[in-house]
Image (cartoon, rainbow, N blue to C red):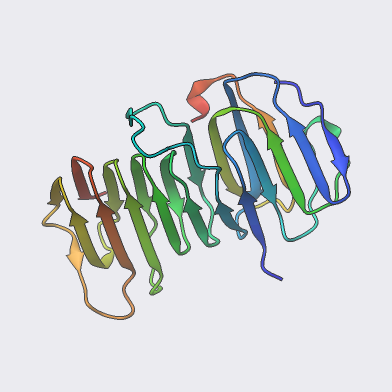
Amino acid sequence: MNFNYKIDGNRLKVPLESESSRAVIRIPSHLNVTIHPLPIAYEGGKYERGNYPNLKISKVNGEIEVNADGLNVDLERVGGPVSVVTYGDISSILSQSSSNKLISLDTYMGNITVGIPNKQAVNLDCTAIKGLIEVDPKIKRSESKKAPKVILHSEHGEFIKVKVI
Amino acid sequence: MKKTIKILGLNMIGICLMQSINAQDYNIPFNGNEIHIIGIMQSLHIIGTSESEITISGVDDINEF
């Protein structure tokens, strides 16, 4: 992929030449990331699973906020607080953490799959309005304020799965 | 100052960094605080690193994701 960039003040504009571009952005891991894509869903529109673009965030320790209506979101080894709202599927592998951070994963149409480290105790709150909830009995549950709070919500998805990794 | 990357759109993706950054790939001499990637994105992977700069690269290999 070639970048024909333009600098406009503090803003770098990078047009993509391909209509199906895949890109990787490497950032300092401590940065916070906020993602607010333009809406692509519309009332009465047909949701087609798998047709959404994929967003993957790896090894970021800052705060992550995704507020989208049309992304499949994959979080891998993220260490900070997380808030994801989307229509698509959400998958996440949590890092071991001793902080009381909040992890909130909310999808309107998609499924949620979460992997929690074996020794990690979490305060887990799952809601699947139309789907099934499957929580690995080996998950260590804790009501302690020191435990990470994990809130999972799927409105029309088929399932929420929480497993030990 | 809060250090935040902000992606503003699907077809027009803007990334705002609340700190000065360098975009090294393709020798982009940039020390601003906003990056907008304009185009239709099939997949975007944001990776945290120990480096202090930001780099942007296109990927042809789906295995990167």
Residue A139 at x, y percent in the picture: 18, 59
Q: Residue at x 81, y 30 (%)?
A: B26
Nearest the eye: A5 or A25: A5
In the rendered structure, the answer to whether residue A74 lies left or right of residue A4 reads left
Residue A1 in the image: above or below residue A36: above
Residue A73 in the image: above or below residue A50: below
Residue A115 at x, y percent in the picture: 29, 49
Residue A40 at x, y percent in the picture: 48, 36
Q: Residue furthest front?
A: A44
Residue A165 in the image: above or below residue B13: below
Q: Residue at x 44, y 60 (%)?
A: A82
Quarter of the figure with residue A12 = top right
Q: Residue at x 42, y 54 (%)?
A: A84
Residue A95 at x, y percent in the picture: 39, 57
Q: Residue furthest bottom?
A: A145
In the rendered structure, the answer to whether residue B42 lies left or right of residue A27 reads left
In the rendered structure, the answer to whether residue A140 lies left or right of residue B52 reads left
Nearest the eye: A7 or A25: A7
